[in-house]
Image (cartoon, coloured by chain):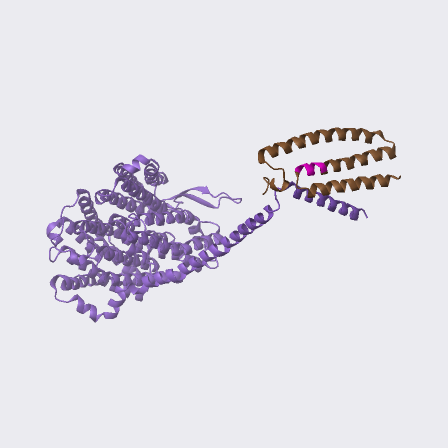
Chain colours: A brown, B purple
Amino acid sequence: MPLQAYLVLAALVFAIGLFGVLTRRNAVGILLGIELMLNAVNINLVSFARFRADVGGLVFTMFTIAITVAEVAVGLAIIIAIFRARRTIEADHLDLLRG
Amino acid sequence: MLLGSPTLALVVLALPAASFLLIGLIRPLRRRGRGAAAVSIAAMGAALAVAVAMWQRARPVLDGPPPNPSATWSWLPADGGPMATVGVMVDGLPLAMCVLVTFISFLVQVYSYAYLHDEPAPSLGRYYAYQSLFAFSMLGLVLAPGFLQMFVFWELVGLCSYLLIGFWYDRPSAARAAVKAFWITKLGDLGFVAGIAMLWAATGTFDFWTLFGMVDAGTLAAVAGLPTIMFLIYLGAVGKSAQFPLHVWLPDAMEGPTPVSALIHAATMVTAGVYMVARAFPLFALAPDVLTLVAWVGAGTALLAATMACVEADIKRVLAYSTVSQLGYMMAAAGAGDPQASVSHLLTHGVFKALLFLGAGVVIHVFHTNDMFRMGGLFGRLPWTGVAFLVATLALAGIPPFPGFFSKEAILGAVLDGGFTGPFVLLAVTSFLTAFYMFRAVFLVFFGRPQAHADAHVPLAMDGVCRLLAAVTVIYGLVLAFRAHHGEAPAWLPWASMLVAVAGIALAWAMYQRGAIEPARLASALAPVDFMARRRYGLDALYAGLYRGVLLALSALVGWVDRYLVDGVLNVLSAASLRAGDTLRRLQTGQPQDYVYGVAFGVLLLLVWAHVGSR
C-alpha cells in the first residue's frame, strides 16, 4: 500500500478525534477524542519512518505513547478532581473562564 | 535733571518686598496680625526715610550731556544681546514719586492699624501683606527703566488693587467691584501690552533711556505707525488712570476699606497712568494727534466726573469722582504738552486726596454710614478733623495758598498755552463744579444739624495721621507759593481760577448751608444733566449690558463647545470602547470546546492561506 493510504487513515482518525473533542459534552469523551488525535499523529510518524527508512519516527512514537499515557493519567485525575468539586463533568457547565 | 543713587533706590524697593515676603511666608506672623502690621509699618517707615534721603542726596546735573540715570541688569538673554533689562532709573520724576508713594503708604498703614482694629488677626495679616506688595509694586513701577519692567509692575499694581478692593471678599458687592476693577483696567492693559510689543518690534528696545536717545537722534520719529503705538500705550493709561470711558471701575472700588481707597487714589494705583504718560512724554511728543486726544479726553473726563460727583450722596463716591476728575486735569496737562504740570498736580493731589479719604474714614467711623445726608454738625465735635478736611477741600477746590491752587493753575496755564481753548473751558467749568461738590460735602458733613447717633471717639492713630497730612498740605502749599513762578500763564489766570472756585463755594453755601436755593429746583432747572449724571451717563449700564450680552454669551458659547463638542467626542469614544469591550467579551465563553473550534478553524485558515500563497 502506498504512503498516501496511511496518511489518509491518519487524517481520518485525526478528524474523528477532533469531531469528538468538539461535540462530546462529557469530559471523558473529550479526553478520548484527544487520544485519537494523538494516535493519528503516531500513525503519521510510524508510516513516514517505514517509508523513508528512518528510525527517528519510531523513537518519536515511543516517546509520544509514553507521554500520552502520562497525559491520560493526569487528565483523568483532573476530571475526577473536577467531579469531586462540582459534582459534574459536563463541559457545558464548566465555564468558570467565561469573560 | 536730578540724578539719584541707584543703590538707595534698590533699598527703597527691597524694604517693602522683604516685608511682603516675611509676612507672606512666615505663617505665624501673618496669622497674628499685629506683628505683621508692625513689620509692614516698620519696613514702610524705613523705606520712607531712605526715599527722603535719596531725594535729598540727589545731585543736579548742570552742564554737559546728561548721564544715563538708570542702572540696569540684562534680562531675557537672546542671541543678539539681552532682549530686555531690569533695574532702576533714578531721575527727578521717580525721586519725587518714591517720596510720595512711601509717605502715603506709610501713613495709610499707620491709619489702617486703628481703622481695621476690629478685623480678625489673620485678615489683618493678609491686609498688611497686600499693602507691602502694593507699595513694592508701585515703587517698582516708578523706578522702572523700561517699558517691560514697568508693565510687569503695572500688572502687579492692578493685582494688588484687586486684592485690596476685594479685601472684604465675603461681601458680594466688594467681590464684584474687585472683579470689575480688574476687568476694566485689563481692557486698557491690552492696548498697553500691544503698544509695547509693537514699539519693541519697531525699535528693538524697551529702555526709556535708549528710546529718549532715539528721540533726540530723530530716528524714532521715522518709525512707521508711531502714533498707533503711542495710542495703544495711552490706552493702558486710560484704564489705569480711570479716563473716560474706562473710569467706571474707580467709584465701585470704594467697596474696599477706606484707607485702601486713600492709597489707590492718592499714591499707588490711579497715578500710574499719569506717571507713565509723563515718563514716556518724549515719545508721546512725537505723536501730536495722540496728545490732542489725551488733552480732550482728559478735560472731558474731568467735567463728566465732576457732574457725577455733584449728584452723589455717598461721601466716598464723591471723592472717587473727584479723583477721576483730577486725573482728567493731569491728563489734560500732559496732553497739552506740559508733563511737569501734570506730575506737579499728581504730587499735590496725592497729598490732599489721601487726607480727604482718611478724613472721610474718620467721618464714616463716627457716623457708621456713607450717606452724607445722614451726617451733619461734625465740626463742633471734631474740630481738628474738620480743619484737616477743610484744608484738603480748599486744596482740591483750588484756593491759595493751598497746594492744589498752584498745580491746578499750572495745568490751566499749560492747557491755555498749548492752544487748547476747548479743554480749557471744560476744565474751568470743572474747577467751578469741584469747588461746589467738595463744599457741598463739607457743609453736609461738618455743618448743619448735628446727628444724634454720632460716636465721636476717634483713635489716636487716625486723628494723628489726619493732622500730620493737613500740616504737610499747608507746608507744601506755602513752599509752592514761594517757589511759584508765573511764566507763560496770563496774569488774569490765577484770579480767574480763584474766582471760579469761590463762586462754586458760594453756590454750595447758598444751597446747603444757607438754604437760599433749593437743590431740587436747581436740579429741575438742569434736568437733562441731572438725569444723565444720576444714571452715570449710562456707561455702567452699557458695560453691564456688554458684559451680559457679549461676554456671558461668549462664555455660554465656549461652555457649550466644551460641554458638547470636546466632552462629547470623549464621551462617544469611551462609550464606543465600552460597547466594543462588552461585545468582545462574549467571545470568552469559558467553554474549552469553543476555543478548540477557534483553534481548529484558525489552523484550517492558515492551511488554506499557505496553500493559496504557495501557488
- Which residue is situated farthest in the bottom direction here? B525
Please say whether residue B308 is one of the residues in the magenta stretch.
no
Q: Which residue is drawn at 60% across and 47% down?
A: B584
Judge from the rendering whether residue B598 lies leftward or rightward of residue B462; answer left or right.
Answer: right
Q: Residue at x 62, y 42 (%)?
A: A92
The residue range painted magenta reads A27-32
A25 above or below B489? Answer: above
| Front residue of B203 and B314 | B314
Judge from the rendering whether residue B537 lies leftward or rightward of residue B368; answer left or right.
Answer: right
Q: Position of residue B442 (x, y in %)?
A: 17, 56
Q: Is residue B425 visible?
A: yes
Please say whether residue A30 is one of the residues in the magenta stretch.
yes
Q: Residue at x 82, y 40 (%)?
A: A9
| Most common SS among magenta residues | helix
Q: Where is residue B513 in the image (x, y as percent from the top left)?
A: 13, 61
| Front residue of B551 and A93 | A93
Tell me which corner region of the image, top left, top right, bottom left or bottom right, holds residue B488: bottom left
Q: Is residue B219 visible?
A: no
Q: Position of residue A43 (x, y in %)?
A: 81, 35
